[in-house]
């Protein structure tokens, strides 16, 4: 399980001041504190490769025969971002590399495809990446919920961290709550309608999940949610906790919910990765979870498709997670609002031959240039 975040961030209070909003609206109303900002040289490919690089061994690279990337901010309409990542990471050649799209839900579909692939090919490994850069535009109502980052997971038989259960329940609803037509750089969003749909999808899918699986909240130590902004996870939990529920159970679920939003509060929405960012935040920061505990997960992608599924923590799962993630946050550089507007919304404008040269970015992976409309990436081993 790996995570990559860009090296820049915006303090949400600075954004509130610049937009003439009460800072509490963002920090208390949405529970957002900071937002990750990616320069033009960091995209879903470089972030995805960086997240996977965090844990991949040479042995893993020989066994991976499928790379799935879930994204809704792809860099090309035809070529899959995972083909670039396959090359950047040096994965063995006889692999399948694809990109899946359904708003923020894509990586969850990828997870199920990966699981089925492993069932048929027990010795192979699948690299699953959820990578996105969420931009709503300057001065929009979604601006305070933007973010950038990538989660990468290695899916295999006998997992080290989380054992997936076979209890998935999905729902599809043809709605226009958030969408991005091909001609638009930013999504269109019906903000309040989208949150209402998110909660309704959660409640109805949870009802169906309970019926089909004969499971209830008491069977779980924690519930992780897709986090378009952290407060919606909290509202989600509150919407499925019935009145009169055991006080200790409620407190435990609430405490774990707050642990699951620690990273999102400092990163923002990373679309396909947001649910997994919540899971990682919970696993890396919890001091109470133990092997055998069950965790429920709610994935939601606008449009809309959602899914509830669960996993069980593996023996010694903590040994396979980082315990110094804070260092990555502390290393980030804080931007002024002016710098953020310039950096996050910089557009790529190739010359008439399709060439652009970017300023040097000495990150592990970066976009170096575009040559005759081809993206050229750089690997800068540290
Ligand atoms: P808004 O309409 O500007 O804000 O934007 P608001 O007026 O609803 O206020 C937000 C909260 O702050 C409210 O809390 C206010 O009361 C509170 P609530 O009542 O809802 O609990 N508030 C304050 N609190 C303390 N002190 C104050 C104060 N002022 C207000 N002074 C909106 C909110 C979510 C609509 C906007 O940010 C937006 O459009 N975001 C993008 C859409 C989104 O995130 N939707 C979520 C569901 S859809 C989804 O999850 C899919 C997605 O990830 C995309 C995909 O699938 O690809 C988005």
Image (cartoon, grey):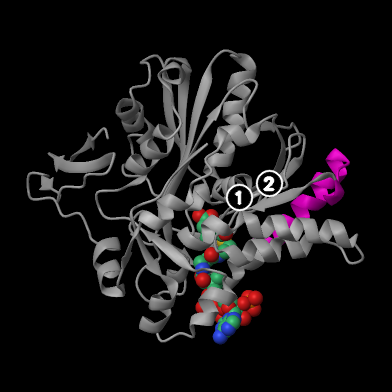
User: In screen coordinates, is 17 left or right of 311?
Assistant: left
The crowding category of the residue bearing disc 2, from other C-alpha atoms within 10 Å (few below 14, some 14 to 19, many at least 20), is: many
Q: Is residue 204 magenta?
A: yes
Secondary structure beneath disc 1? helix
Q: Residue at x 77, y 39 (%)?
A: 293
Q: Is residue 314 magenta?
A: no
**Residue 174 x/y as whole percent:** 61, 54
Using the rendered image of the protein, determine whether residue 171 is visible from the camera's viewpoint.
no
Quarter of the displayed picture in which ligand 1 can be seen: bottom right
Residue numbers of the magenta segment: 198-218
The mark that comes first in sequence, 1 or 2, is: 1
- To which quarter of the image does residue 342 belong? bottom left
**Residue 340 x/y as whole percent:** 30, 67
Q: CA–CA distance between discs 1 and 2?
A: 17 Å
Q: Residue at x 60, y 69 (%)?
A: 193
User: In screen coordinates, is 234 left or right of 142?
Assistant: right
Secondary structure beneath disc 2? strand
The crowding category of the residue bearing disc 1, from other C-alpha atoms within 10 Å (few below 14, some 14 to 19, many at least 20), is: many
| Residue on which the image places disc 1 | 285
Q: Nearer the viewer, mark 1 or mark 2?
A: 1
Above-or-below relation of 96 to 10: above
| Residue on which the image places disc 2 | 297
Q: How many marks?
A: 2
User: In screen coordinates, is 305 left or right of 352?
Assistant: right
Q: Nearer the viewer, residue 27 or 92?
A: 27
**Residue 84 x/y as whole percent:** 31, 32
Evaluate if marks 1 and 2 touch, with contact meaning CB atoms under 8 Å apart. no
**Residue 5 x/y as whole percent:** 40, 50
């Amino acid at each position: 399980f790996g995570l990559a975040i860009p090296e820049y961030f915006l303090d949400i209070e600075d954004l509130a001041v610049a937009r003439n909003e009460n800072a509490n609206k963002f920090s208390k109303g949405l529970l957002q504190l900071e937002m990750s900002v990616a320069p033009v040289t960091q995209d879903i490919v470089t972030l995805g490769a960086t997240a996977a690089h965090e844990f991949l061994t040479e042995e893993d690279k020989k066994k991976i025969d499928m790379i799935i990337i879930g994204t809704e901010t792809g860099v090309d309409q035809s070529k899959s971002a995972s083909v670039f990542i396959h090359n950047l990471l040096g994965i063995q050649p006889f692999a399948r590399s694809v990109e899946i799209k359904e708003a923020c839900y894509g990586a969850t579909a990828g997870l199920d495809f990966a699981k089925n692939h492993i069932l048929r090919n027990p010795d192979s490994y699948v690299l699953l990446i959820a990578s996105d850069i969420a931009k709503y535009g300057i001065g929009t109502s979604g601006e305070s919920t933007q973010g950038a980052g990538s989660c990468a997971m290695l899916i295999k038989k006998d997992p080290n961290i989380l054992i997936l259960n076979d209890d998935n329940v999905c729902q599809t609803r043809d709605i226009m709550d958030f969408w991005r037509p091909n001609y638009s750089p930013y999504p269109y969003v019906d903000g309040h309608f989208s949150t209402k749909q998110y909660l309704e999808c959660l409640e109805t899918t949870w009802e169906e999940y309970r019926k089909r699986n004969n499971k209830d909240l008491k069977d779980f130590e924690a519930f992780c949610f897709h986090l378009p902004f952290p407060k919606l996870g909290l509202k989600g939990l509150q919407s499925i906790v019935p009145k009169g529920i055991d006080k200790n159970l409620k407190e435990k679920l609430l405490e774990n919910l707050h642990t699951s939003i620690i990273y999102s509060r400092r990163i923002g929405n990373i679309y396909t990765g947001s649910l997994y960012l919540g899971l990682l935040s919970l696993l890396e920061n919890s001091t109470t979870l133990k092997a055998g505990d069950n965790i429920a997960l709610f994935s939601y992608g606008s449009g809309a498709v959602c899914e509830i599924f669960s996993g069980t923590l593996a023996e010694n799962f903590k040994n396979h997670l980082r315990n110094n993630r804070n260092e990555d946050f502390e290393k980030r550089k804080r931007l002024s609002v002016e710098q953020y507007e310039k950096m996050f919304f910089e557009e790529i404008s190739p010359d008439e031959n399709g060439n652009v040269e970017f300023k040097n970015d000495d990150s592990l992976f970066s976009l170096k240039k575009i040559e005759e409309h081809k993206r050229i990436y750089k690997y800068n081993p540290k």
